Amino acid sequence: MLSARSTLSISCLVLFSSLLPGRVLAEDASSVPTNSVSSPTSGFSEDWFARVTRIQAAQPRWITPMTTVTPRLEEEYRYDQSWETSSSGSHLTSFGGGKGLELIPFDNIEVILGVPAWQSRNKPAGTDGFADESFLLKYRILSANEREGDYILTAFLGLQTPTGSKGNTTDHYAVTPTIAGGKGFGDFDVQSTLGVGLPDNGSAPSGAGTPLIMNTAFQYQIVRVIWPEVEFDYTYWGNGEHAGLNQLFVTPGLVIGRLPIWERLGMTVGVGYQIALTDKPAYNHNLVVSVRFPF
């Protein structure tokens, strides 16, 4: 039997999915020829991938950064793993990093279905377990490929549900509206996001607050598949239990991709190392490895 928390999480997912514009379904259906004789299954898959190809052709061809969520629409499965050292000297290994399946179901829309990360700590004992579930909806407002201007502007809406185990959950629901954009200049590009976390206890003096979150990635493309980068991740708490505090991380990294595997299926791998630039950060050293399978 589902717990009350699981039932509420599923309800949030249904509500989250309902934010997709209803008119998109009608527009998508109207684009399918009425005299099609292909089977429903084959027709659906062929139409899906043709639509994804068309949608992605109208945006820049940059690679997804290590920590900054790209404003581009992607269709892939992503797995991250990180080895984090806290300021107190404890170690945490995150299997999956909360990443998961990324799909482009309709024009200008991407949905990310996160897979809860498994968190393993060296101390205290008995605190290993799954982290919270997360979802992300992207809506691409405008974009142009490298021939038309090489830019993009996208709105995000993130949802986090408190489904994690004790010691690995925030115990609160949170939504994160975000605006993201990017601009390319030849082989160089900048991708950036600006959002605010809105947990259900954000207004409480002892709550998590409503942090302002900004990530920016600077990338350079070398020999088609090699992308060295530097990213900056900044968070500021104006209220809540961390009021007045901020933290800034720099992440030098390298992403290689997209490497072809078979037909549409490819592979991208990346590695980055986060270093804290401010005092008293949540952690100081974090090695991150990312593997993605775009399709």
Image: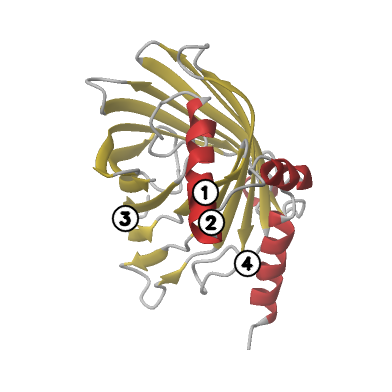
- Residue 93 position, x and y percent, is 33, 60
Q: Which residue is mark 2?
A: 113
Q: Which residue is mark 4?
A: 171
Disc with the residue nearer the chain's start (3 vs 4): 3
Q: Residues within 10 Å of mark 2 (few under 14, many from 20)?
A: some
Q: Which residue is painted at 58% across and 22% down in the image?
A: 143
Amino acid type, residue under disc 2 in the picture: Leu
Disc with the residue nearer the chain's start (3 vs 2): 3
Q: Which residue is painted at 69% across and 46% down in the image?
A: 29
Q: Which residue is mark 1?
A: 103
Disc with the residue nearer the chain's start (3 vs 1): 3
- Residue 56 position, x and y percent, is 49, 32
Q: Secondary structure at mark 4?
A: loop
Q: Which residue is mark 3?
A: 89
Quadrant for the C terminus, please: top left
Amino acid type, residue under disc 3 in the picture: Gly
Amino acid type, residue under disc 1 in the picture: Leu
